[in-house]
Amino acid sequence: MENDFQRSVSLRASRRPDRSNSSYQKGGKLMPDYSMKMIWKRGFIRLVLVAGIVWMLLILFALLFHIWSCQSSVAFFSAFCNKESKVFSMLHTMGIVQPPHRCPIPVVDDPNTIVIPKRRSPERFVQKLSYIKEDDMANNVSQSTPLFGGHQTWQQRNESFKVKPTMKVHCGFMKNGGAVMDPKDIKYTKKCLFVVATGIFDAYDLPYQPSNVSERSRKLFCFLMVVDEESYKFIKGNVTVREDDAGGQWVGIWRLVLLKHPPYDEPRRNGKVPKILTHRLFPQAQYSIWIDGKMELIVDPLLILERYLWRGKHTFAIAQHKHHRSIYEEADSNHRRKRYARPLIDLHTKIYRYEGLEPWNLGKGTLSDVPEGAIIIREHTAMNNLFSCLWFNEVNLFTPRDQLSFGYVVYRLGGLFKFFMFPNCEYNSIFILHRHIREHSSRIEWVKDFEEFEKDPTLKETRGGLGLWNPYPGNLASVVLPPVARTSKAG
């Protein structure tokens, strides 16, 4: 019995932990194994904390870089800014960033204080301008198809650049060429001396209402939205269109002006009719402001006229392009972005190079040869109307990329056409830009070489760009386009 008790005691003793191997010592000191566990535990916590701090710093750095790039005036860095991102939208809503390339416009405080000039600007070089409305086809019976831009010969084109007191030029709207206005719209627009015009073609956009328009401007300006038949049907099916007692169609402040029988196969070329030939559509207008259809005007139009025309005694104002100054840079960009058939863009610019147009340089006396053409502000003087006609004739003859033609026409007029090219950052402060509803549908934009035209003749436009297919009176084979150094990732 005693032996059993001793055996039980010794067994319990053997099961007890050895105090000599315990994590604790007398006096509360830690043993090595426990210390290592605590070190690893604390080290892991510190590692997690450090990793979290580093991660937060990276996020903060990325956010700060995003803000800085969006505000940067350096084109390379501003190209990193994603204006469509939720991050940018959130930062803009919080007032932390402003949309890129924007700056305050030095407009007057109150439209009601603006004094409208009583006299029109004097005509210096052209006193009388008239337009060719019918083709003389007696010498060329084969060209009998009516064309909106007419069958302008190379000789007629060359003569049109020789400025004289009395001139008669091609300027679209040839008899039976298309782009016909409804009589009720013609009657309405006859009273429009001040015009804000825009256009939607091929149902690419929805109407956007201007904001910050004063009551004085509402009474003074006609807000005219030129549309083709497809866009007219699309707008009526998607937004509220009201009809007045005279049959006029209205979307908010915009009076819809329907152009029946589009003159061109290419929708972008159709859009150049109201944009460049505003003075032909609305011949009674003394002043006009054109904005592209995807833009929402956010500045009072009377303030725009005062800032860009009357204050500096200008008659024509257009913004400087954000990235390019030479048309050869712009052509290279159109190449990369597939804005029109590459071989035709090359041919277009080769003709300009053959005719002496140098790449833009400081000696030209202009800020740039390439404008941002989405906003055009002008007084309808004879010289401005002549410039618009000649500009349109280039768009009619060659590619619809009007930014390629602007600087060429300025060059051919030899400094007689004066205009104000204002900073691009102000241009971006005049409007809010919206995306097109859908992409353009032109097949010709994807053509890479002339062989594709030979394989599929239907790719060619039949009513526009015919100057690129008619024999040119010069040897273009020897023309070498100037080298282009890409100055901007975004451009």
Image: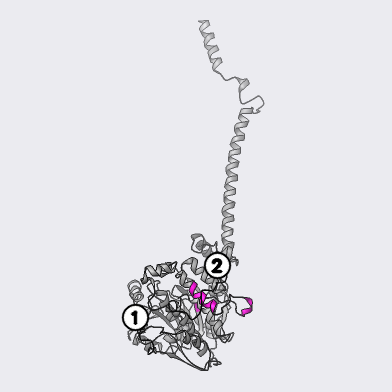
Element type where label 2 sits in the image: loop
Residue 261: mark in rendering: 1
Q: Is residue 474 left or right of residue 266?
A: right
Q: Position of residue 315 (x, y in %)?
A: 54, 86
| Between 314 and 9, the one nearer to me in the picture | 314
- Foreground residue among 329 and 273: 329
Q: Nearer the viewer, residue 491 or 411?
A: 411
Q: Which residues are magenta?
A: 346-375
Residue 451: percent from the left, percent from the top? 42, 67
Its colouring scheme is: one colour
Residue 434 location (% of width, % of height): 45, 69
Q: Residue at x 62, y 31 (%)?
A: 36
Q: Residue at the spot x=58%, y=52% of the render?
A: 58
- Say if residue 221 shows up in the picture: no
As for residue 360 lying within the magenta part, the answer is yes
Between disc 1 and disc 2, whose residue precedes? 2
Vertically, is 166 above or below 214?
Answer: below
Q: Which residue is mark 2?
A: 100
Q: Which secondary structure, mark 1?
A: loop
Q: Is residue 97 left or right of residue 133?
A: right
Picture coordinates of residue 470, whole percent (x, y): 43, 79
Asked whether the viewer can see residue 70, the reply is yes
Q: Amino acid at mark 2?
A: Pro
Residue 396 position by quadrant: bottom left
Reply yes or no: does residue 218 show up in magenta: no
**Which is more toward the observer, 409 or 92?**
409
Task: Kindly identify the residue that appears in the image at 59 percent across and 62 percent down.
Answer: 68
Q: Residues within 10 Å of mark 2 (few under 14, many from 20)?
A: many
Badge 1 amino acid: His
Tally of marks: 2
Residue neighbourhood size for the residue with mark 1, other residues' Cα within 10 Å, grouped as few (<14), some (14–19), many (≥20): some
